[in-house]
Image (spheres, helix red, strand yellow):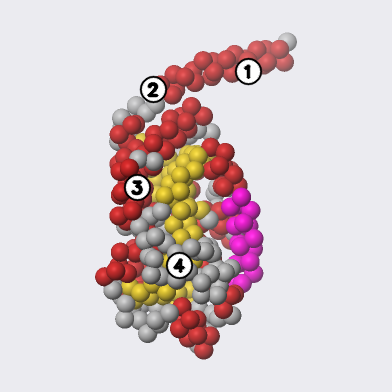
Amino acid sequence: MLIRRRTLLAATAATAAAVASPAIAQSYPRRAVQLVVAFPAGGSTDVGARILASLAEKDFGQPITVVNKGGAGGQIGFTEIARARPDGYTLGFLNLPGMNTITLDPERKAAFTIDSFIPIVNQVLDPGFIWVKGDSPYKTLADLVEAAKKTPGKISACTTGILSDDHLAILMVQEAAKCEFRIVHFDGGAQQLTGVLGGHVDVAFDNVGSVFKRVGTGEIRGLAVTDVERSKFLPQVPTTKELGMPTVISSSTRGVGAPKGTPAEIVKVVETAFLKAINSDEMKQKMDAVGLALKPMVGAEYAKYYADLQKQAAKYTEWAIKMR
């Protein structure tokens, strides 16, 4: 009797959920939605998120508020997203592979796993970018590498966080060129900019979207883009492949996700509104203006990319841990 009663209750709950699901989608959102960015204001992730929020909220009919929760290379913000109520009112930007490596590094003791999030829609694929101050003595990547070989551990190179895509790019260059940098970890692109332009750090391993406009002003000098093709935003800067480092390929992808358990109907509403914004002409114009390359992915494509990158990140994280 007890088993039958439990079965009946479970069936009743399932039926109720099925009936309630359309109502959930129709009533969502009823109030402002929070979009958590796991890095400080002013960096390229923050810039892209704010453009997306401003356009997507037109279809939402409710404000989408960007909230910066920077610190620990994104770990603080990602934890906030994972622990949020799965009701669609707290969404977050998923930065890959930085988020992947946090979950894979035992020393980080992350309170979340890759399965703590539902990847909904990807917005950006931002290639890595190696740059120095405009008056730096290093004119080319070859100059930088040669100096690092002569003075191992002396030339400082900064990242946007431990085991971020920038950190992995430094490790790749060190392996490819058989050199060694003194690695400095910051919590975001804005701190990188301050560190290098202030003369406190020699070189930044960053992303194109963070600083591409400053190349044109002469404030900074681009040494290389860590990709197989030149960036349309920096056509004058050679790629690492061109410079004889075909294994040094690194980028940052950024997309919107939700905490595990968020109803599928709500996820679909978010996907539809955000994808429409990403594919709009206004989005393309605004993203071109800030040097961020769009790479929309949803559904099975984004889910596969998300899972595949976790496998790749596992290899890089194991390698990085061994090099500590």
Q: Which quadrant would the C terminus be assigned to in this image?
A: bottom right
Which of 95/301 is in front? 301
Q: CA distance from mark 3 to mark 4?
A: 21 Å
- Secondary element at tag 3: helix
Task: Say whether residue 318 is magenta.
Answer: yes
- Whether residue 250 appears in this view of the structure is yes
Labels 1 and 3: the sequence-earlier one: 1
- Whether residue 128 appears in this view of the structure is no
Q: Dot 4 corresponds to which residue?
A: 225
Q: Dot 1 corresponds to which residue?
A: 10
Q: Dot 3 corresponds to which residue?
A: 284
Q: Is residue 18 above or below residue 133?
A: above
Q: Is residue 75 above or below residue 159?
A: above
Q: CA distance from mark 4 to mark 2?
A: 45 Å
Numbered circle sitting on residue 58: none
Disc 1 + disc 2, Cβ < 8 Å? no
Image quadrant in which you'd find residue 216: bottom left
Q: Which residue: 26% across, 70% down? A: 217
Which of 247/190 is in front? 247
Labels 1 and 2: the sequence-earlier one: 1
- x then y, percent, for residue 280: 35, 40
Labels 3 and 4: the sequence-earlier one: 4
**Residue numbers of the magenta segment:** 308-324
Q: Amino acid at mark 1?
A: Ala
Disc 1 + disc 4, Cβ < 8 Å? no
Q: Which residue: 34% across, 47% down? A: 284
Labels 1 and 4: the sequence-earlier one: 1
- Secondary element at tag 2: helix
Labels 2 and 3: the sequence-earlier one: 2
Q: Amino acid at mark 2?
A: Ser
